[in-house]
Image (cartoon, rainbow, N blue to C red):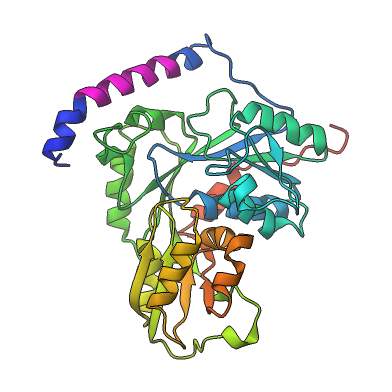
Amino acid sequence: MMLSVLALLLLPFSWLYAGVLAVRNWLYDAGWKHAESFAVPLINVGNLRVGGTGKTPHVIWLVEELMRQGHRPAILSRGYGRQTQGARLATAHDSAATVGDEPWQYFEQFAAQQVPVAVAEQRRIGAQLLLQKHPEITVIVLDDAYQHRTVQPTLNILLTELARPFYEDQVLPAGRLRESRSGAARADVIIVTKCPADLSEATQLAVEKCIRRYSKLRIPVLFSAYAYAPPHSLNSEKDVEATLQNAGPALLLTGIAQPGPLREHLEKEGFELRHHANFPDHHAFGPADMEALRAHWRPGWPIFTTEKDATRLQAPELRALRAGLPIYTIPVQVAFLGDGGTVLRRLLPSIPPLDA
């Protein structure tokens, strides 16, 4: 990978940052710093790179699969972008503002199944809170805790995007990696995300070869794609329903790290995106954003967004401003290539015996 002039100038700072993190990781690996284990298994879903690699849909896949196997799972996240601090259990009185957009999405999706969702900057304290309040839990899924070495995952899942693989990147600030590529050696399974559904076997083998320069020997390297479900109306008012039978002009509103795959999906479906309001990841939508969006909108045009963004669009201060706008979310599901789903299912922890 060719580096830009700016990246080359920043490389010394990247080496310094990577060196500090390498010492920290060595202290954990050597046992000088303690990583806490818990009475239930911890499954971590994380990455080496800042920005979106598809953690949220993979966490959802895991939780759904764990429930199918008879587990009582819980989800623990940092709660990035929330306006609160400390360990906190999500309740019906919370929102994306109080627990973060991804945790609130988890809570809304799994409320009927009574899956506890907690947020905590310190995952150790968050796990303790979950087990104290919900002793029935049999497994905790950690969202984005790959660099959080104070807890010891039972299964460490590393995600990397096909279009932006970690082995072609540099450590911050020259690149986008949170730590050096050697961090991949902590993974028990690596999933290459956001792949085309028809990704060739030759390409898979080439990518796997590059990954195995940094991973542990013989760990599974899996490939996953996105499967988009039909649009779902965010508003309940009948008068805002736009006709989606025939594709045509539309708007796109996103505040995620990588909106490209969704945009490509909508264009493949025949929608002509007249305007894309593209904000940074975890952007807190405000009244000015909604007014600017309405200025680009024309009656009959659907407005598409993600489930994650929808959690922030439902803030009380935006309710009146989005009234009358036909906003639709596009649910995203993970679809593993080949036998990847079967391989991952076999790696999940077994259900403890009743007398455990």
Q: Which of the two residues, 299 or 144, is positioned nearer the viewer here?
A: 299
Q: Which of the two residues, 169 or 335, is positioned nearer the viewer here?
A: 169
The part of the image, by quadrant, that contains residue 10 is top left
The location of residue 273, given as percent across then percent down, is 34, 77
In the image as oriented, which residue stretches furthest toward the left?
A: 5
Image: 74 above or below 333: above
Callout count = 0
- State the predominant SS element of the stretch in magenta: helix
Left or right position of 260 against 100 = left
The part of the image, by quadrant, that contains residue 167 is top left
In the image as oriented, which residue stretches furthest toward the right?
A: 355
Image: 145 above or below 207: above
Image: 34 above or below 347: above
Q: Which of the two residues, 173 or 345, is positioned nearer the viewer here?
A: 173
Left or right position of 105 against 144 = right
Image: 231 above or below 335: below
Q: Which stretch appears magenta? A: 12-25
The part of the image, by quadrant, that contains residue 216 is top left
Q: What residue sits 29% from the left and 41% below the top? A: 209
Q: What residue sits 30% from the left and 31% below the top? A: 171
Can residue 216 be seen in this snapshot? Answer: no
Image quadrant in which the N terminus is located: top left
Residue 43, magenta (yes or no): no
Can residue 252 be seen in this snapshot? Answer: yes
The location of residue 157, given as percent across then percent down, is 50, 40
Left or right position of 112 against 176 = right
The location of residue 208, given as percent across then percent down, is 33, 44
